[in-house]
Image (cartoon, grey):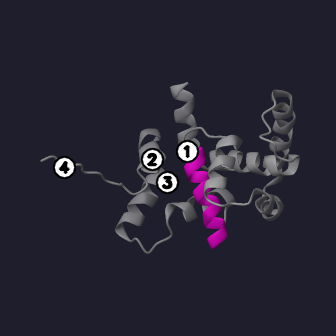
Amino acid sequence: MKSLMGGDFASIEGRGIAWLAGEEWKLAAYREIDANPDLPDMYERSYAKTFGAEKVSKEQRQVGKVMELALQYYGGVGAFCSMAEVYGLRLEDLAQSAWPIIPENFKRDARTAWSKAVKRKRTYGLEERVWTVCHALVLMWRAAHPAICAFWAELD
C-alpha cells in the first residue's frame, strides 16, 4: 500500500521570496502573524505598507491579496490583471477608487509607461486610466518591497 501526502504551507511563496531577498519588514510581519493569527494578515499589511494606510477595508485587503500574489515574482500589469480576474477584483472599480489616493509621482511614472505599452502593444485591452492605475499599483508595491526588487536585479 502506498500513501500520497500533501501539504499547504501558509504563504509559502511570500515567505520564500522575503527570506531569499532579505525583506526584513516582511519577515518580521510573518513572525508577528505566526505568533498571533488574530493580527492583520500579510494581504492587509502589504496594502497598508504600499498605500501608507492605517486601516484596511475588506475590499482593500483584496487589492493587497492580488498585489502580493501577482507581483512578488516580478509580475507587472499583465500578472496583476490575471490575478485580479481570478479573485473577482473589478479593474474599472479599482481604477475609480484608487486614482485619488495614488501619489502623483506614481501616476506620472505610470502615464509615461502607458506610452511605451501602447507602442509595444502591451495594454492587455485595457483603457488608459485602468492600465495606468494597475501600473501605478505595481510601482507602489515595488517601492514598498525594495529588498525583493534588489533581489530580482541580482538574479538578472
Question: Judging from the image, what secondary structure is the residue with disc 1 in?
Answer: loop
Q: Mark 3 or mark 2: which comes first in sequence? A: 2
The residue tagged with tag 3: helix, strand or loop?
helix
Picture residue at 86% right of the left edge, 51% below the top: 129
Provide the secondary structure element on which disc 2 rests.
helix
Magenta segment range? 57-72
Classed neighbour count for the residue bearing mark 1: other residues with Cα under 10 Å, few (<14), some (14–19), many (≥20): many
Image: 28 above or below 145 = below
The quadrant the C terminus occupies is: top right
Tell me what residue is drawn at x 35 percent, y 68 percent.
35
Q: Are marks 2 and 4 in contact (CB under 8 Å)?
A: no
Please say if the residues under marks 2 and 1 sit with CB atoms less than 8 Å apart.
Answer: yes
Quadrant of the rendered structure where residue 85 is?
bottom right
| Residue that protrudes farthest toward the left in the picture | 1
Judging by the rendered image, the residue that carries numbered circle 3 is: 25
Numbered badge on residue 72: 1
Residue 55 has which mark? none
Q: Earlier in the sequence, mark 1 or mark 4?
A: 4
Mark toward the start of the polypeptide (2 vs 1): 2
Point out which mark residue 13 bears. Answer: 2
Between marks 3 and 1, how big is the CA–CA gap? 15 Å
Q: Residue at x 43, y 75 (%)?
A: 38
Q: Is residue 61 magenta?
A: yes
